[in-house]
Image: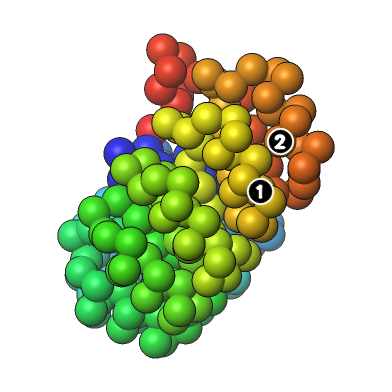
Amino acid sequence: MYKRIVSLIFFLITANCFSQGFDSYDIKSFIDKGARVIVGKPFDTYDIKSFASKNASLVTVIGDGFDSYDIKSFIDKGARVIVGKPFDTYDIKSFAAKNASLVTVIGDGFDSYDIKSFIDKGARVIVGKPFDNYDIKSFAAKNASLVTVIGDGFNSYDIKSFIDKGARVIVGKPFDTYDIKSFAAKNASLVIVIGIQTNKKYIID
C-alpha cells in the first residue's frame, strides 16, 4: 500500500516523471530539461544527491529503503522526501526539523496523535482509512493545507466535509460522475480525480 500511495499521489499531484526503469543518466537529462522526477531505490544515496545537485527543487525521493541519515542528507540537498513506516515518530520529526516544507508523511501505521504532531511540525500528511471522518477533520483543523485525503472507503458526504475543511481529496471509482462533479463544485482546486483503474486497484503501482 505504501508504494502504491506514494507513486499514485505524487505522480498526479506534481505531474512528475516517475523514474522507475530509467538509469541515472536519463534522470539527469530529464532534470536538465526542467522535468520533475520521483526517485528511490534502486538508485543509491550517491545517485540521489547527484540528481539534487542538478536542481533539487525538481527532485522528490521515496524514502523506502533508505535510512534516516540518508533522508536527512537528501533534505539538506533541498530534495523533497516522502516517508512513512518503518520510520518512527522520532525519525519523522527529525526530518521535519530539517525542513518541514520538504517532508510528506504517509499516514499508514501512525496514530492520530502522531499525525497531528507531524502537522504541528509543518510536514504534509497523506491520510485515509483506517482514520475516520472525525480524525480527518481534526487533522484539517490543525492546518488543512498540509492534509491530503485518500477517498477510498469514505462516502460522498465525508468527501464534501473534508473539502469544506480545506483538505485536498483524491477520489475515483466507486464515486460516479455526479459525485465527482459535486466535489469539484465545492472547490475544484482541492479535488484530484483518479481516471485510470482496473478491478478497483490503481494501475500506477
Which residue is at the front of the view, 10 or 136? 136
- Identify the residue at horizontal 52%, vertical 30% (top origin): 155
Which residue is at the front of the view, 101 or 125? 125
- Identify the residue at horizontal 76%, vertical 37% (top origin): 184
Question: Looking at numbered disc 1 in the image, what kind of residue is underneath it?
Answer: Ile
Mark 1 → mark 2, Cα distance in angstroms: 8 Å
Question: Looking at numbered disc 2 in the image, what kind of residue is underneath it?
Answer: Phe
On the image, the x and y values in percent for residue 136 come to 47, 53
On the image, the x and y values in percent for residue 142 come to 53, 71
**Label placed on residue 181:** none
Disc 2 crowd, CA 10 A, few/some/many (<14, 14-19, 20+)? many
Figure quadrant of residue 87: bottom left
Q: Quadrant of the N terminus?
A: top left
- Identify the residue at horizontal 77%, vertical 46% (top origin): 187
- Identify the residue at horizontal 70%, vertical 18% (top origin): 177
On the image, the x and y values in percent for residue 63 come to 32, 61
Would you place residue 161 above or below residue 51 in this image?
A: above
Residue 18 visible here: no
On the image, the x and y values in percent for residue 88 come to 20, 69
To which residue does mark 2 refer?
Answer: 183
Would you place residue 87 above or below residue 43 in this image?
A: below
Residue 65 visible here: yes
Secondary structure of the residue carrying tag 2 is helix
User: Do residues under tags 1 and 2 come within 8 Å of each other at their CB atoms?
Assistant: yes
To which residue does mark 1 refer?
Answer: 163
User: Which residue extends farthest right?
Assistant: 185
Secondary structure of the residue carrying tag 1 is helix
Would you place residue 158 above or below residue 46 in this image?
A: above
